[in-house]
Amino acid sequence: MDALLSWKPQTWVDYVLLYIAPGFGMAMYLLAKAIRERPSEFARGLLNVLGKKLTLVDRIKDGAVYCFALACVLLGWPGFMIWYFMNKKAEVARQEFQDRPEFDCAPEYLVAAVNPVDAEITSYVIDPLGKVPALPFGHLNKAWGNFLANMLDEQDELWSFYIPMGSKVGKYQRMCRAEIRGYAQVRDGKILAEFMTESD
Amino acid sequence: MTAQVSERLIYAGNKEISLFSNPLSLFLRQTEISFVSPHTANWRGYVGTWKIIETDGVERLYLVKLAAHKSYEEIIGLSDVFPGFDKVFAHWFTGQLRCPQGAQLEYVHMGYGSTYEYDLLMDFKRGVLVNKHARHNEVPPKKEEKDIPSFLRRSQ
């Protein structure tokens, strides 16, 4: 151990070995990952049935590709390291985007903080044929109840929102074909839920 | 995606016409109700029949009939989704209804994408009809090979 710690590179070969050591570690990691992710027994069986069984030539080609990739990683490991971390970062960002809830309302569409009682007072629907329940938000009353039931935190605020027609809404920024109105559950400026009262 | 079976609209007397809009979608989204698709031409799992009824000079949109697939076999009606109501005022609907009229100029095998001679367009605000007009459609220009992305072309 002492000998290893006291070792210092002296010749250019030592320096080359020192340079490729992290690359070797990285290559081994990538190789293990590739082995772990290789097609399962079932997938290989399917490929055999489809007449896509690996021939000897294919295996030699694969081996050559792996050797070439190994050499690239050994020599160009700093670049691969940068690529690896950038890829990881992009993957995390992609996952965050996928996990983001699909709300049409965004902070720029919030109008004003409102009291739930005031919101209910103005929400009754008048229909001369009486085809709406005499409850706040009419047929949407149950949905309103569920929306309010989730506003348990003291920090939660109820905000009204208005989205003009033609605005880009939602996670995928689709264009809305009609104006949208409703209420949003807001905590620390972040929208946690929405209740739409009007849309197409 | 297959062309979708349309909603129905009873308008101008008892004439029933196709409706290429889904006014029930906000209600279903808010109440977290969903139906089962019986086939590829009905992904939403229901067909609603709507009627515009005039009262005191104001025309309102009502859902008067519903055939919704609770399961592949079981079809439920309006009173199952809206207990105690034989008609439902669509007070949540703000937007435009599109009713295709006349001959079909172009068939599109997706959603409500087909083009017809005319579109009867009706604008609603909270379920109340506020404007209506007709739009005359032309036969859409045929797409040339160069307008199609290379990977979708028949000959590369």
Image: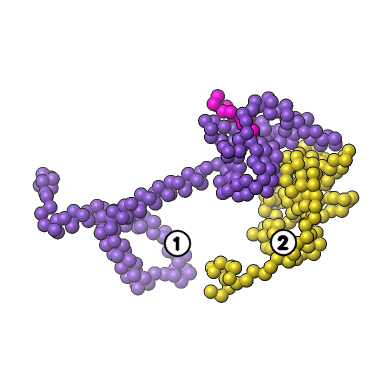
Number of residues whose C-alpha sits closer than 10 Å to that of mark 1, classed few (under 14), some (14–19) or many (20 or more): few
For the residues tagged 2 and 1, is the chain the same? no
- Report if residue A149 lies within the magenta region: yes
- A18 or A40: nearer the viewer: A18
The picture places residue A177, in percent across and down from the top left corner, at: 68, 48
Q: Which mark is residue B114?
A: 2
Which colour denotes chain B?
yellow
The residue stretch that appears in magenta: A146-160
Q: Using the image, determine if residue A118 lies above or below residue A50.
A: above
Q: Which mark is residue B92?
A: none
Amino acid type of the residue that numbered disc 2 sits on in the rendered structure: Ser
Image point 67% across, 38% down: which residue? A181
**Residue A7 shown left or right of residue A157 in the figure:** left
The picture places residue A7, in percent across and down from the top left corner, at: 11, 49
Image point 72% across, 49% down: which residue? B22
The picture places residue B90, in percent across and down from the top left corner, at: 77, 41
Amino acid type of the residue that numbered disc 1 sits on in the rendered structure: Ala
- A20 or A111: nearer the viewer: A111
Q: Secondary structure at mark 1?
A: helix
- Report if residue B120 lies within the magenta region: no
Which colour denotes chain A?
purple
Q: Using the image, determine if residue B8 lies above or below residue B94.
A: below
The N terminus of chain B lies in quadrant: bottom right
Residue identified by numbered label 1: A43
Image point 51% across, 46% down: which residue? A98
